[in-house]
Amino acid sequence: MLWEIPLTPGLERFSERLELSGRAYSLEFSYNSRFGAWLIDIYDDAEELIIAGLKLEEGLPMTLFFRGNTIDKLPEG
């Protein structure tokens, strides 16, 4: 499933809570003006950090470069 994240210029930080594959996640977005890019932190339903500071790239899957235990904590897709 493809999930598009609407990122708004001028908005520096926001968060989303969602359920994927039956599990709750918190996504925290922040805009880094130095890099000119959006970054994301992903937390599980227990507020345990799964991924921190992942740079979002248009058209690429967020988990493209992750392997091992971290990827096992994320939903499919």
Image (spheres, helix red, strand yellow):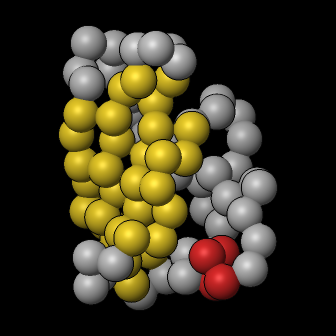
Q: Is residue 30 or residue 25 the one in the foreground?
A: 30
Query: Is residue 73 shown above or below 33?
Result: below
Can you see residue 27?
A: yes
Above or below for 5 versus 35: below
Q: Horizontal placement of 15 versus 64: left or right?
A: left
Front residue of 68/9: it is 68
Q: Is residue 24 visible?
A: no
Picture quadrant where residue 44 is located? bottom left
- x and y percent of residue 48 in the render? 34, 78
Which quadrant of the figure contains the N terminus? bottom right
* Residue 42: % across, % down: 41, 62
Q: Residue at x 24, y 21 (%)?
A: 11
Rendered view: 10 above or below 52: above
Q: In the displayed image of the protein, which residue is found farthest to the front?
A: 34
User: Up-down: is 58 above or below 25?
Assistant: above
Q: 30 left or right of 34? A: left
Which residue is pictured at 39% across the width and 32% down the height?
Answer: 6
Q: Residue at x 29, y 81 (%)?
A: 45
Where is residue 20? Give x, y as percent.
Answer: 44, 74
The quadrant of the picture occupied by the C terminus is bottom right
Q: Residue at 25% x, 24% y: name it.
A: 12
